[in-house]
Image (cartoon, helix red, strand yellow):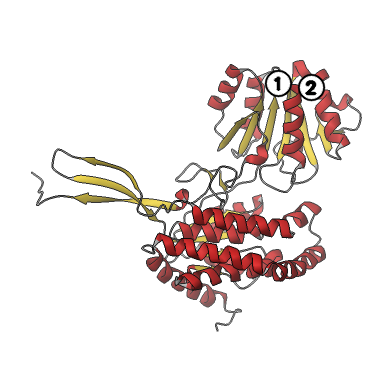
Amino acid sequence: MLDHSDIPALMQDIGRRARAASAELAYAPADAKRQALEAAAKHLWDNRDAVIEANAKDLAFGEEKGLSPAMMDRLKLTEDRIAGMRDSLTAVAAQTDPVGEIITEWDRPSGLHIKRVRTPLGVIGVIYESRPNVTADAGALCLKAGNAVILRGGSESLHSSQAIHASLVHGLSIAGLPEDAIQMVPTRDRAAVSEMLSMVDYIDVIVPRGGKGLVGLVQREARVPVFAHLEGIVHIYVDVDADPVKALAIVMNAKTRRTGICGAAECLLIHRDVVDTIGQGLVKALIDAGVAVNADETLQSIEGTTPATQDDWGKEYLDMMIAAKVVDDVDGAIAHIRQYGSQHTDCIITEDDEAAARFFQRLDSAILMRNASTQFADGGEFGMGAEIGIATGKMHARGPVGVEQLTSFKYLVDGDGTIRN
């Protein structure tokens, strides 16, 4: 066993083993990967009491660190949440294996037949905070796509993540796949993160999943390519032609269902012509539900609001708080979102097709929605089984990063003694 205090040596060893495992996984049978994930799902559920016990240690650690209620909610595992992880593992297992899929093929006048086929990325490093379910989602998605993965969970979720990781390793063992295919960094030492960011010989891409501080650090320091999962500064614009019943249901769900997830609404934009009708109703309903509404000058006349400051625009609260502002029209909403958004998820509530089309055309967020709760910004809800994150960049992967997004492609070229003139 390597000394965990020698972080460079520890990480080099993990990297070497991951690279070796990835070479084997690249041609692993689809049935073996499916069997591994199904066995992991069963093991996780059968051992749920041990997972909850491990999670209790993390919750105690989180209390000591003074984590916010929203962060504690992200950290907490219940039987229902473990059932959700089990179901995600099963859903990913049931998906079509992407490796070797022919994306397109064509013939050339030269006599060549060319195919573009999906191939694994190789080794993926996932650095994440708080939510231990990322351990299961990331491990499952990477495996399904034929990749080895190195998981570095948040220090506050170490015990929970290790318990979940044990189920993934059990699944690999049952299916006869290399157990090094899914490795967990076994230390809270932050030096392990710095090592991962420079492991260009072993890691093909880094996926950071967490707050602005973590993602910013990774983007600044990584020598390995990064799929950036930036903060979710999620806007909902209530148009002049919004249906009031739909608007109430959507806004309340988008803000209050779970405040600590990246698809939670953080800013409410209201068309000036419906401030005294739909707008009043929405703001009062949020306040009645216990949401602190940081309002612009126009909305401050509503009892219970607090004045918004400049810092409230473009803020990810991840809590029972929301910023609220009046805009003149859909173009005003678009301008505000362009200035303060994070290109994650933004929504328009309207019955006007033209306004919706303008919103969709002129914004470039990874996910744009109409008349639907932004809490659907999730790979599982998109039918991907699970997600490793929501990529807000524009290269390679964008939006929910599922199995297909964790592959690259290669060209297979067939000839018959074909030579070039």
Residue situated in front as seen by the camera: 108 or 155: 108
Q: Position of residue 144 (x, y in %)?
A: 47, 58
Is residue 56 shown above or below 274? below
Task: Tell which residue pokes out farthest to the right in this image.
Answer: 303
Is residue 315 shown above or below 237? below
Say what secondary structure mark 1 lies in. Answer: loop
Instruction: Give the residue displayed 57% in from the left and 21% down from the top.
Output: 358
Q: Position of residue 319 (x, y in %)?
A: 78, 46
Instruction: Say which residue label 1 marks.
Output: 242
Q: Decide if residue 230 is in sight here.
A: yes
Is residue 119 shown above or below 61? above
Gap between marks 1 and 2, in whole Å?
8 Å
The image quadrant where one finds the N terminus is bottom right
Instruction: Give the residue displayed 76% in from the left and 54% down from the top.
Output: 73
Task: Tell me, yes or no, whether the two marked residues, 1 and 2, touch with CB atoms within 8 Å.
Answer: yes
Q: Position of residue 296 (x, y in %)?
A: 80, 28
Residue 249 figure quarter = top right
Q: Which mark is residue 278?
A: 2
Q: Decide if residue 233 is in sight here.
A: no
Of the image marks 1 and 2, the number of the one nearer the N terminus: 1
Task: Tell which residue pokes out farthest to the top in this image.
Answer: 273
Residue situated in front as seen by the camera: 34 or 115: 34
Q: Amino acid at mark 1?
A: Ala
Q: Amino acid at mark 2?
A: Ile
Residue situated in front as seen by the camera: 151 or 249: 249
The image quadrant where one finds the C terminus is top left
Crowding near the residue tagged with mark 1, few <14, some 14–19, many ≥20 C-alpha atoms within 10 Å: many
Q: Position of residue 196 (x, y in %)?
A: 53, 65
Residue situated in front as seen by the camera: 88 or 181: 88
Is residue 379 shown above or below 307? below
